Each structure stands twice: as C-alpha cells, then as structure tokens.
Image: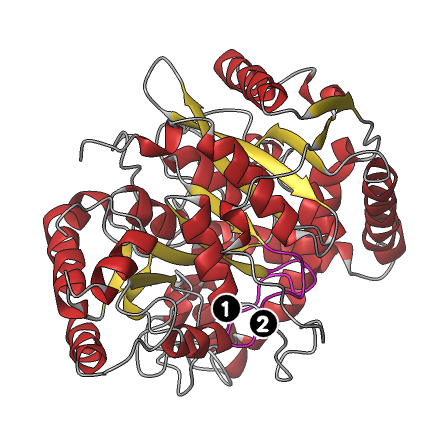
C-alpha cells in the first residue's frame, strides 16, 4: 500500500491480510517524511532505527499485537518518550531525554502501533500557529506560506501531508481541534480525565488533555480507544471504564438534536467560514437532525477566562525550569544571574509572556480580582452547557473563525491570535469532549473545520455524530498536492 493518504484502518487491515508488512508501512512513512518534511518541518525527531526495529519485531509475531498493529504513529513533542528527545518545543529542554514513557506511549505499544517520531509544537503548547517553537515554524501542507494552526501543528501537518496516518496532540484551549481544522483532518479533544496525562509536560493542568489526529473519524476513534482509560499514576484520570468507540462510528447515528449558539457568530467570523458552516447544518438536516438555537451567554467571556486560568497554571507549572532542578543551565557568576540567564534564553517570547501574565494574576492583591473571578465565570460557562444539553445532544460551531493565516501575520499581535480561540476554549474550560471534522474549503483552497461539542463522557455519541456528517460529505477525501 503506497498511497500516502491511506487511512490507519486500511493500513491495519492490509497488514492483517498479509498484503503489507509492518516494515512496508513504516518504510513508506519514513520515505514520505524524507521526501516532504524538509518543506513542512512537521517532525522534531525521527526515530528511524527504533521504528524499523519495532516493525520487524511485529512482523515476527504470529498474531496481531493489537488494534493498531504495524500502523505508523507520530507523537507531539511534549509527550515523554524513554531515551528520545522530548523538548516541548522549547530550548530550555533541548538536552532532555526522559527515562520513562508517558502512559499513552505505553498504551500505543500495547496496541501494536509503531512510533516513528516526535512532532514540532509551540513551546510548552503555548500558541495557535506553531510559530512559537524553538526549532522553527511548521508549514501548512495545503499552502506552505500558511500556518498549520497550533499548538499541535506538527502532528496535524504530519497527518494532513501523508507522513503518518495517525498522530497524538494535546489540547488545552483548542490545540488539537484548531490545527485539525486548518489542515483539513479530524482532531478529537476527549472529555477531561478520559486519557491519562502522565508523562505529558504540563502547561495548564486543569485544561490539558491528550487526543488523536486522523484522516477519518474512524481513525481518530481507533487511536482514542488505544490510549483511553483509567491510569492510577494520574490523579486527574477518571476511575471509570472506557466505552469503546471505533466500532460505534460505523453504526447509523440516531436522529440528532444539534444546538447552534448563533450569538457567537455575530462578528469576527470570515464569510467563507460562515458559508461552510451553514452548508454543514443543511447536511445535518438532510440526515434527519433537528437544529435548535441555544444560548451560551458566558462563552464570549471564554477567551478572557482561559487566558487567566491557563497562564496562572502555566506560571506554577513552569517554575520548576530554573536551571537547577530542571531545564538547561546557562553559565553565570551567581545563582541569581544563572536563574536569569537560563530562563531568559531558554524560554521564548510567548512562554515568557504567559508566565508573566500568570504570575501577575496570582500575585497579592490581584488573585481574587482576576484568577478567582475567572474561575467563577468558568463555572458559569459549564452551567450554560449543562442547560443547553438538556435540549440538545451536540452543539455545533465553526472550529476557527478563519482559515489558515499567513506565517508571520499575527506574531506581533498576540491579542488577535488569542481572540481566534473563541470557539475552542469553552469546551476545555467546561471539561467537555469536542471534535473538529473537515467541512469545506475557502476560494483559496484552504480547509475549514466543523466543531461538535457534547456533554461529559459522551465521547462515543460525539464521534458517532461526526462520523455521520463525514459519511454524508467528501471533504475528508481531498488531500494537499505536496
């Protein structure tokens, strides 16, 4: 199977039929990386020898190792991998090689996947364009002058560009869904607590969640099933059994009640995005869905709440990178100078901006006015969703108010970058599952995404809704010419 855009399910099935070996699949992925990635910079590290050795080991087995037997998978570079560089896109971790694997890495091994490398990301997952990486920006496979979204832009570009069939990212305020939309693929942020965060380099601990990228909803479900479930090593992992989703996405979805918060679209959304969204609603109606207007009155405050809560947690989490216990140490003549040199050269501009903002909102005299108030509004956002889900099964919005923008266009305007998260930040603030699926293209042939959000632990229903829409359209069948 030499089609670089073959689905993970197709690759797995070909290996099971003996039409393909695991080594064939991995060699094809590595060859594609070698041919294309110099233009994309999707990969931070390629684990060529380890991947080939793993593929050979799988080929020697008499029975499949698991549901992803032989399928090449990429990992965002904020997931710990034993002996393989894990930098979280930051220079302060340029020499870090973990001595353990993240839980999701262990589970991928158990599922039979082959990890081919680590992907480029915004430093510590802080960004919406993958321009904040300490190792150069990633480019969008659909247009190399455009961003792929962020912070998991490398993983999204790797899947969209045909370098791998599957990849993992992390989503704090939209970092899986937004790049999935901008790159024309599927990206799932599971319910908070559904996937272990053990081994994920923390940004904002009450928001971070690991999730899959795939070319189809079924592929995303296969990867989700492989990594989900309780983990006693993660205190935020929910002690409940995982309800398998991959088989369910092939089943016909029951008539859905779809909520649409139109008050969120009143300004700031590009015309092609709105047109594609309205067309998506018509497709859902043709499938028997009922469309209802819902109110999420506090969601417009989501961006402000997110950038207070997330930066406060980032300030606390990143305090450990001081050049003594963690992070690269820079030479200096005193302890204070060493701290300053290590952190000022190791952290990039966006990470410094968020640390300073978070430190400020937690400081004496401001904590109650900013951080505590943000947490109170966060509760109101969650209650708004609870009320909406009394009437509907899923809520639909565009994933991003714009298509992929030019590289460099917003680097000097962080506020405009932050405001673009308007549709993605409410779900993680409320701990809800959300997914982005391809729903159209702009006149410039840039992909657009449709977002579905559902109630907590309704990940299975969410994936069924997305799969039903996907079967009724052909947007996921288009691929970039790179």
Whether residue 150 appears in this view of the structure is no
Judging depth in this view, the residue of 461 and 181 nearest the camera is 461
Residue position marked by numbered label 2 in the rendering:
196
- Going by the image, does 115 lie left or right of 224? left
Q: Is residue 191 above or below residue 296?
A: below
Dominant SS of magenta comes to loop
Give how far across and how far down residue 116 sits, in percent. 25, 66
Q: Is residue 440 above or below residue 173?
A: above
Q: Which badge, 2 or 1, comes first in the chain's sequence? A: 2
Nearer the observer: mark 2 or 1; the answer is 1
Which residue is depicted at the point 28% across and 59% down? Answer: 13
Whether residue 430 appears in this view of the structure is yes
Give how far across and how far down residue 216 sits, in percent. 40, 44
Which residue is depicted at the point 52% across and 43% down? Answer: 177
Q: Which residues are magenta?
A: 190-208
- Going by the image, does 436 lie left or right of 378? left
Give how far across and how far down residue 132 sits, in percent. 41, 49
Q: Neighbour class for label 2 at 10 Å: few (<14), some, many (≥20)?
A: many
Q: Is residue 443 above or below residue 467?
A: above
SS at mark 1? helix
Residue position marked by numbered label 1 in the rendering:
227
- Asked where in the image residue 202 lies, by quadrant, the reply is bottom right
Which residue is depicted at the point 29% across and 40% down? Answer: 139
């Amino acid at each position: 199977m030499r089609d670089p855009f073959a689905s993970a399910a197709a690759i797995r099935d070909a290996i099971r039929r003996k039409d393909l070996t695991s080594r064939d699949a991995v060699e094809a992925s590595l060859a594609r990386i070698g041919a294309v990635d110099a233009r994309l910079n999707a990969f931070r590290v390629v684990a060529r020898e380890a991947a080939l050795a793993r593929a050979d080991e799988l080929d020697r087995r008499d029975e499949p190792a698991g549901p992803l037997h032989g399928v090449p998978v990429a990992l965002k570079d904020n997931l710990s991998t034993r002996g393989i560089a894990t930098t979280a896109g930051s220079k302060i971790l340029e020499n870090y090689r973990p001595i353990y694997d993240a839980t999701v890495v262990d589970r991928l091994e158990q599922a039979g996947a082959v990890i081919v490398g680590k992907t480029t990301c915004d430093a510590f997952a802080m960004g919406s364009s993958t321009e904040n990486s300490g190792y150069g920006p990633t480019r969008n496979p659909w247009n190399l002058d455009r961003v792929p979204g962020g912070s998991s832009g490398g993983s999204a570009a790797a899947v969209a560009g045909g370098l791998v069939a599957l990849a993992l990212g992390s989503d704090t305020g939209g970092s899986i869904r937004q790049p999935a939309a901008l790159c024309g693929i599927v990206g799932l942020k599971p319910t908070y607590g559904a996937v272990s965060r053990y081994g994920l380099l923390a940004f904002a601990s009450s928001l971070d969640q690991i999730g899959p990228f795939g070319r189809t909803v079924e592929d995303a479900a296969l990867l989700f099933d492989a990594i989900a479930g309780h983990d006693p090593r993660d205190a935020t992992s929910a002690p409940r059994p995982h309800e398998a989703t991959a088989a369910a996405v092939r089943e016909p979805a029951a008539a859905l009640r779809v909520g649409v918060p139109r008050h969120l679209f009143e300004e700031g959304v590009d015309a092609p995005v709105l047109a594609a969204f309205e067309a998506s609603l018509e497709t859902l109606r043709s499938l028997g869905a009922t469309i209802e207007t819902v109110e999420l009155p506090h969601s417009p405050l989501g961006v402000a709440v997110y950038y207070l809560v997330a930066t406060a947690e980032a300030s606390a989490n990143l305090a450990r990178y001081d050049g003594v216990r963690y992070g690269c140490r820079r030479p200096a003549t005193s302890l204070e100078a060493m701290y300053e040199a290590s952190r000022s050269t190791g952290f990039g501009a966006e990470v410094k901006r968020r640390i300073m903002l978070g430190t400020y909102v937690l400081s004496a005299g401001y904590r109650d006015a900013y951080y505590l108030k943000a947490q109170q509004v966060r509760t109101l956002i969650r209650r708004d969703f609870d009320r909406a889900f009394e009437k509907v099964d899923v809520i639909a919005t565009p994933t991003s108010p714009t298509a992929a923008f030019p590289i460099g266009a917003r680097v000097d305007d962080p506020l405009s970058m932050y405001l673009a998260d308007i549709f993605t930040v409410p779900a993680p603030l409320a701990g809800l599952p959300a997914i982005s699926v391809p729903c159209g293209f702009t006149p410039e042939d840039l992909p657009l995404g449709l977002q579905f959000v559902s109630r907590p632990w309704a990940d299975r229903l969410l994936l069924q809704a997305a799969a039903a829409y996907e079967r009724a359209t052909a947007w996921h069948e288009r691929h970039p010419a790179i």
